[in-house]
Amino acid sequence: MKASIVVFPGTNRERDMAIALERTTGRKPTMLWHRDAELPAGTDLVVLPGGFSYGDYLRCGAMAAQSPIMAAVRAHAERGGLVLGVCNGFQMLTEAGLLPGALLQNASLRFLAMNCTMRVERADTAFTHHFQRGQTFQATMAHGDGNYFCDAETLKRLEGENLVALRYEGENPNGSLNAIAGILSPNLRVLGLMPHPENCVDPLVGGTDGLPMFTSLAESFAAA
């Protein structure tokens, strides 16, 4: 699998993501600067990692969604390429129109830095097939605007078309509608989620609960 990670001003999780991808794929991902206009030839997966792009001075992810590289990311998604957006990356995906809805300020009006538990709603995607449907796992969260919101029609479509990939199990820490932690595009090739699975791939750091997501991605391309 050939992966590329996009770095924006204020991104701070790109190295964590690179470690997770290299651990499971055996090859280092390419780091792209947000002003780049093209993806490397043969890119399979594009990752928009977490952080505080442009200092979150406008809506989180809104300025990053206008960066030159995003035209290439959109084209990649339209071709059926895989795109993963985590935390700030999820915010970018909604701002860029690659996923519906928006990430609002946490219901508590506080920045949350804590572990959370998620439940896998779909285990038949390139991102999740190494999990079991209904399986729960822990990941870390670090965000002030992770409260997923969309209009009633969009929510009905997400639920009706089974596009909710992950939900918070037990406590709903940020107040997201229907406890949504992550959603998929209709073709199941774009995933956005708020918690950080890349911080849970090493038993010496944060456990290995997030490893199946990256193993799923690696094995999808190995099988192909």
Image (spheres, rainbow, N blue to C red):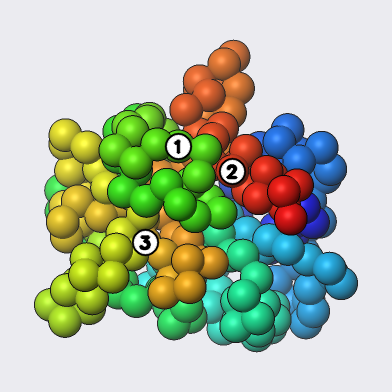
Figure check: 35 above or below 223? below
> Mark 3 sits on what residue?
183
Q: Position of residue 3 (x, y in %)?
A: 74, 56
Residue 5 quadrant: bottom right
Q: Position of residue 30 (x, y in %)?
A: 81, 56
Residue at left offset 17%, top offset 74%:
156
> Mark 2 sits on what residue?
216
Q: Confirm whether residue 194 shows in the render.
A: no
Q: Position of residue 29 (x, y in %)?
A: 79, 51
Callout 1 crowding tier (Cα within 10 Å): few <14, some 14–19, many ≥20: many
Figure check: 30 above or below 139? below
Residue 73 quadrant: bottom right
Tell me the distance, in whole angstroms, between the alpha carbons under discs 1 and 3. 16 Å
Going from N to C along the chain, the mark reached first, 3 or 2, is 3
The tag on residue 131 is 1
Please, what secondary structure does the residue beneath circle 1 have? loop
Type of the residue with mark 1: Phe
Judge by depth and name the residue closer to the eye, 164 or 52: 164
72 left or right, relative to 132: right
